[in-house]
Image (spheres, rainbow, N blue to C red):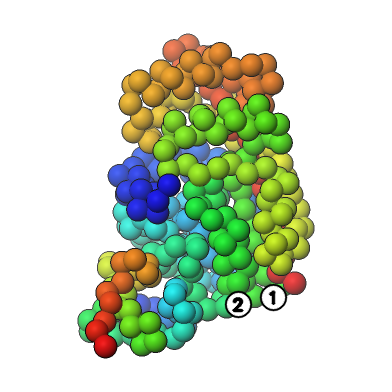
């Protein structure tokens, strides 16, 4: 299932409070500024900085 | 106490919290709802929602209700119960109150019940909760507290830490006023020394929920039964058969973002 529109409207990166890019297929939310990728598990976005995947580059 | 330890403690004990009488029906829930004064259409953030008892108690006329917690297991338990009860306006987000993943001014109400004593930096947490409120929005908190008396404060602190090693600190009403004012919030109402209903909590039930060892239960029992009169009165300690009943005082507050 996809994240609800109302939630996507207010979710930001917990580190920089910047906008996120939602990849529905991969069930991930990415912060392009911090280069952090947050997973979504059982429709619950896991917005924990410690548990985010660090992207290269 | 580290966030990982808090996460682990609550991941392991989620099922007990889902059915705990105090968490489901406690007077603290009624106090919180009175303090929050939710209006139709309000977006609400329930910080450290756990198994979402508070989030699920929000009036059906509220807008979107978001339960936020560090523990996925607690929220999955909450999600299951919300589905069973057909509560459609509830969403969950794994998040840390010290770094909330919500835009400024996202919510009309931010609430938290029986949780802030776990926050590792309560001042930062209150600033974050204030940030995500809309101007004119309201923060409502009910949490374990302590009377402003060093003897009782120390007793409560030792007891809470024996019960749950991830326990941070129970703050006094005066400390709460300070946290809110430092975060730029205006305190509307402060209710010190609230108690749960139903004659307090049972030591047996309280310790079983947190998976305390028999030895720890024995230590807590001795502490409670040997408490000095001022502590006995503040915690309403009563021996009933093989069990001991008592209640740690709570504080309730409502604060407004100007």
Most foreground residue, B189 or B175: B175
Q: Which residue of the protein is positioned furthest toward the front in this rendering?
A: A57
- Residue B253 visible in the snapshot: no
**Residue A29 image position (x, y, % from top left):** 33, 80
Q: Which residue is painted at 35% across and 48% down in the image?
A: B5
Mark 2, secondary structure of its residue? loop
In this image, B258 relative to A45: left or right? right
Residue B67 vertical placement versus B229 (above, below):
below
Mark 1 nearby-residue class (10 Å; few <14, some 14–19, many ≥20): some
Q: Which residue of the protein is positioned furthest toward the top in this rendering?
A: B241
Most foreground residue, B181 or B142: B181
Among numbered discs 1 and 2, the one appearing first in the sequence: 2
Mark 2 nearby-residue class (10 Å; few <14, some 14–19, many ≥20): some
Quarter of the figure with residue B88: bottom left
Most foreground residue, B222 or B250: B222
In space, the residues marked 1 and 2 are separated at their CA atoms by 7 Å
Q: Are marks 1 and 2 in contact (CB under 8 Å)?
A: yes
**Residue B186 image position (x, y, % from top left):** 76, 63
In this image, B231 relative to B65: left or right? right
| Disc 2 target residue | B105
Disc ID at residue B16: none
| Disc 1 target residue | B135
Q: Which residue is painted at 60% across and 58% down in the image?
A: B123
Residue B64 vertical placement versus B251 (above, below):
below
């Amino acid at each position: 299932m996809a994240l609800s529109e109302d939630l996507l409207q207010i979710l930001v990166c917990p580190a920089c409070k910047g906008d996120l890019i939602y990849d529905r297929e991969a069930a991930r939310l990415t912060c392009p500024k911090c280069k952090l990728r947050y997973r979504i598990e059982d429709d619950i976005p896991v917005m924990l900085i410690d548990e985010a995947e660090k992207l290269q580059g | 106490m580290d966030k990982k330890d808090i996460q682990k403690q609550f991941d392991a004990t989620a099922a007990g919290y889902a059915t705990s009488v105090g968490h489901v029906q406690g007077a603290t829930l009624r106090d919180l709802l009175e303090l929050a004064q939710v209006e139709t259409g309000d977006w609400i953030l329930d910080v450290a929602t756990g198994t979402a008892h508070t989030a699920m108690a929000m009036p059906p006329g509220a807008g979107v209700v978001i339960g936020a917690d560090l523990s996925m297991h607690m929220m999955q338990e909450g999600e299951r119960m919300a589905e069973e009860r057909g509560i459609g306006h509830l969403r969950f987000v794994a998040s840390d109150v010290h770094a909330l993943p919500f835009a400024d001014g996202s919510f009309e109400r931010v609430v938290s019940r029986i949780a802030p004593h776990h926050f590792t930096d309560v001042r930062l947490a209150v600033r974050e909760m204030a940030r995500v409120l809309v101007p004119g929005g309201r923060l409502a908190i009910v949490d374990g507290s302590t009377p402003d008396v060093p003897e009782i404060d120390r007793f409560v602190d030792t007891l809470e830490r024996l019960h749950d090693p991830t326990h941070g600190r129970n703050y006094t009403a005066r400390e709460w006023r300070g946290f809110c004012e430092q975060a730029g919030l205006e305190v509307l109402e402060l209710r010190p020394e609230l108690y749960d209903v139903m004659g307090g909590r049972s030591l047996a039930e309280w310790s079983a929920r947190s998976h305390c060892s028999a030895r720890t239960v024995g230590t807590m029992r001795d502490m409670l039964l040997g408490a000095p009169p001022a502590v006995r009165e503040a915690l309403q300690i009563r021996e009933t058969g093989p069990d001991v009943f008592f209640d740690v005082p709570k504080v309730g507050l409502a604060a407004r973002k100007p």
